[in-house]
Image (tube, rainbow, N blue to C red):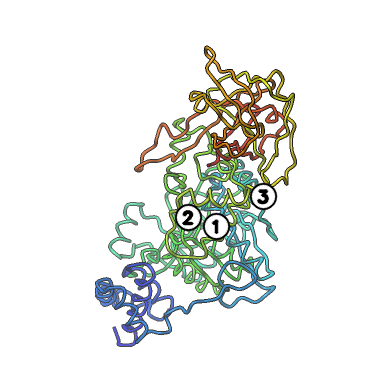
Amino acid sequence: MDEGTASRARGIALQNALEHGSTSAGIVISKLLGEVPSLRSRAGEIAPAVARIVAEVNAMPGSARRAELESSHAGRLEAPRERESRGPLPPLAGAERGRVVTRFPPEPNGYPHIGHAKAAVINTEYAKMYGGECILRMDDTNPEAERLEYYAAINVGLEWLGLEFARKKNTSDDMRELLSRGRALIEAGGAYVCTCKREEISRGRRAMRACACSARGAADHGERWEKMASSYRAGAAIVRFRGDMASQNTAMRDPALFRIIDARHPLLGAEHRVWPSYDFAVAVEDSLDGVTHAFRSKEYELRGELYSSLLAAMDMREPQMAVFSRLDFEGMPVSKRELRPLIEGGAVSWYDDPRLPTLAGMRRRGIAPQAIRKFVLSLGFTRADTTAPFGSLEAANRAEIDASCPRLHMVRRAREARVSGLPRSVTLQNHPSGGLGERSVALGDGTLLLDAGDADGAGALWLIGIGNVALERDGDGLRGEYVNDDMSSGNARVQWVARDGAVAITVAVPGPLMVGGRYDEGSLREEAGTVEAAWAALPEGQAVQLVRYGYCRKDAPRQAVRAHG
């Protein structure tokens, strides 16, 4: 490897290690080939030298990495950038106001979750920042995994988040175009039809060895392409990109671009049996849709080289690509691979279980969509992996809903207390600020319900909205009398519920679904409570703060879900 290339590789390694703590040969080679495409044919030759550079850089302390970057590769040090006043995200390179086009391409193979929310918020926010547009594009080219139910769930979730899209489409809308471009790529020699067995293909990719199919002529591959649509059985043939089998980036070792799937498509039925891979479809669609800035999560970072190579091979316009980190919550599985067994096995009732990081689960829990959007934007556009404590989102939600959240009283393990000297009714504020009005609570004959934890001590208490009362035991209950409304008494301030009109409810209390990587059977418990009569008038879905208990969402006439404290 020549001196200039070695210097560039070292600069990349230093920059990546400084940002993420360490780096790898695969990442450095991928970035190096992206910066200098002419090196792609020499990837195998430069790999050993890059590996040595990476080993040296990883062994350096962070201060030494920064010092070398500053002295020898200053251009790779990002200067602190002021966020544009138009939005909370950093500016986009090469962005022109009114001409930015982004896209959010979820696959309709499951219910949307917090990871989808992050990607969707970032894409729509950037479009908004630059007066551009964001496209919602369902990436539906795997009929074995996709269902109409999932298309609907994604649309419902995004509408609930309040996100707006300039256009909505499905990748499958363009199937004829995708197939046409696939055939053209084969005819141009940029791809070929491979009939090797899956195990043989895997061995060849590991050994960096091309298969015999790649040496066949274009006419032969054209005939094989026709057979994929007509006579080949599923799994008997795939179309592979003619990449670089010697590449250190495994994504470039002749990856699959098309495969045979005989399952019926939710929208197109049995019209097609040859379907493009995600790598092929997303590259072509981004170019055709006029996307200027494409964002993808960090797990796809190494596939960026393939994205660029495919578009170059088809002579298609390439959008600018940027990578951001995934978003996970501690104790909350996001991947379908983890969620489906829990649901199918009955451990979790459905995708709206309040323990889940699905949008349906968070909605049922009482997390406001505005809180999710603000929380995502507060994380910024970062490449560092983000595993956040759920408490961070809870704090954002508390700040979002508190001002519009009425206060009601609830007691647990209710104890009756007959209190003399009370008025026929009292007026309570619906919110401490006074901004949500007030309610009149009838006290009837003075029989109140107290929380067992407060009532067991008896003695003197300050009943919120009433005043000081003196209580003593009376058999299984309590009796007492009103004393005064002196707030300086120092008595414990407690909530209460008038017996007349009280409503018995059950509160579902979600906790972390997974503890130490294993499902916690006690992660969803139920608590019984009794709330005041005003509960009955609240609409289902209403957020409410139950005094001295926490923020909850009314889930049903006699059911609540606790969001957080």
Neighbor class of circle 3 (other Cα within 10 Å; few <14, some 14-19, many 20+) is: few
Instruction: Please state which of residues 272 and 133 is positioned toward the viewer in this rendering.
Output: 133
| Residue sitting at x 46%, y 62% | 221
- Mark with earlier residue (2, 3): 3
Quarter location, residue 12: bottom left
Quarter that holds the N terminus:
bottom left
Q: Position of residue 319 (x, y in %)?
A: 56, 71
Give the residue type that dot 1 points to: Val
Discs 1/2, front: 1
Quarter location, residue 202: bottom left
Q: On the image, numbered disc 2 is attached to which residue? A: 327
Instruction: Please state which of residues 465 and 99 is positioned toward the viewer in this rendering.
Output: 465
- Position above or below: 122 against 80: above
Neighbor class of circle 2 (other Cα within 10 Å; few <14, some 14-19, many 20+) is: many
Q: On the image, numbered disc 3 is attached to which residue? A: 159
Q: On the image, numbered disc 1 is attached to which residue? A: 376
Q: Residue furthest top?
A: 475
Q: Position of residue 148 (x, y in %)?
A: 61, 42
Kindly tell me whether residue 479 is visible in this rendering.
yes
Give the residue type that dot 2 points to: Leu
Kindly tell me whether residue 270 is visible in this rendering.
no
Circle 3 — which element? helix
Q: In the rendered view, does 158 fall on the left or right side of 376?
A: right
| Residue sitting at x 41%, y 81% | 38
- Position above or below: 165 against 126: above
